[in-house]
Image (tube, rainbow, N blue to C red):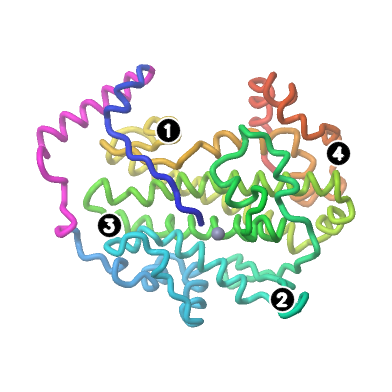
Amino acid sequence: MHQQRIWMFSHLIILRDGHHGLRFLLSFCYFLFAVIFFPMEPVTSSAERKPCRGDKDLPSLLRAYDPDAYKMLRFGLDDGWDYSAYVSDPDRPVDSLGTIVHEAFHAYSYAQGSYRAASGTSSVIHEESFYLGHGSTRMIRYENVFPTEKAACAIPGRLRTFRYNAYVGKGSGLSSNQDGIYGLLNEFCAYYWGMRAMESIFPYLRKHAGRIEDWKAFVTDYCNYRNAYAEFYFYILEYFRYAKRYRPAIYKKLMKDKALLTTFRTMQKRYERLICRYERDLNRLSRQYNGCSLNRSRSHGIIFLGSYGWGAGDSAYELLMPVIRSRRYKYLRRRIAGYPHAKDFIDAGDMSAYNGTEFFLNGRNYTRKATLERSV
Ligand SMILES: [Zn+2]
């Protein structure tokens, strides 16, 4: 997990946006409403917030709302793992639940894995455990692969989003770079579990949120985890694509690795559905605080609730999803989806396809067509 950038926008930002008359009107009404009825104090001060069991006992909260995530956290706690280092605000530990579960997933998969001796006293991962939920765990054996940066260095500047440098950029020491495809998949799953934990406690948060500000972590986590979905999905596809082109022996081995492919396929589908569920929750909040749908409360990657707006640092999801769904990866997506004889009719393009006519000079038509394709 990387420290996220968070923006808080006031109505003044909306005032500059001349294209959103309705939103401006709505915002202005909220502003007047707030000034008239709540001139000095927030709706509920921190001291007035209802007693909140989850603030005191995160494991019990998780056990009640997301038993699968709890299983990983419990495993860590029994192993002496201390999650307090991941709590950013001691007064609201529940806001850090996504990060805690993300890290608990990493800890669980490393601890359950096995290792073999390497040079000297060091050891390397032999296999790693991926928790899929409902008590099911899949072991994935680590083969000798190349670091992700070899594939990622061909990604053009405009597609290098927030996580690029830290996770797959040249010299990154993180597992997502060093362990190649396995590290990427591990990170992809960790983000899924973090997002799942936050979405699971939505009923709890709804019951206890006294002020709009109480939704800050819930909204920003949605933006961050949704971006992470697109970023790691993109890196995984690029990794396979590079392997196919430049390291065919490794590619062949990876394509025969059922545990690897089915884990990715399963988690990708679940992640996709989770984003939809999260959006349904946000839609309810938007209707409650704004009187309109989520789509109308979202602007330039920022989600507005009342007089607050929160978002992630960039719009990686909006930028990368049309690329992921494009014909560039159609063959790979079909192979991963379990069509071993998928016809490789598009993979003739090379890396320059990013910058050339294939994507961006004719980008509008191409992208529109691509997004109509069913994602496999
Ligand atoms: Zn991580």
- The CA span between labels 3 and 1 is 24 Å
**Residue hosting label 4:** 344
Contact check, label 3 and label 1, Cβ < 8 Å: no
Residue 196 visible within the image: yes
- Main secondary structure of the magenta stretch: helix
Circle 2 or circle 4, nearest the eye: 2
Density class for disc 1 (Cα within 10 Å; few <14, some 14-19, many ≥20) is few
Mark 3 / mark 1, whichever is N-terminal: 3
**Residue range of the region highlighted in magenta in the rendering:** 19-48
**Residue hosting label 1:** 295
- The percent position of residue 294, horizontal first and vertical second, equals 40, 36
Residue 154 falls in image quadrant: top right
Mark 4 is on which residue type? Answer: Asp
363, 183: nearer the viewer: 183
Judging from the image, what secondary structure is the residue with disc 2 in?
strand
Beta carbon at label 1 within 8 Å of ligand 1: no
- The CA span between labels 2 and 4 is 39 Å
- In the picture, the disc for residue 123 is 2
Mark 1 is on which residue type? Answer: Asn
- The percent position of residue 244, horizontal first and vertical second, equals 84, 47
28, 175: nearer the viewer: 175
Mark 2 is on which residue type? Answer: Ser
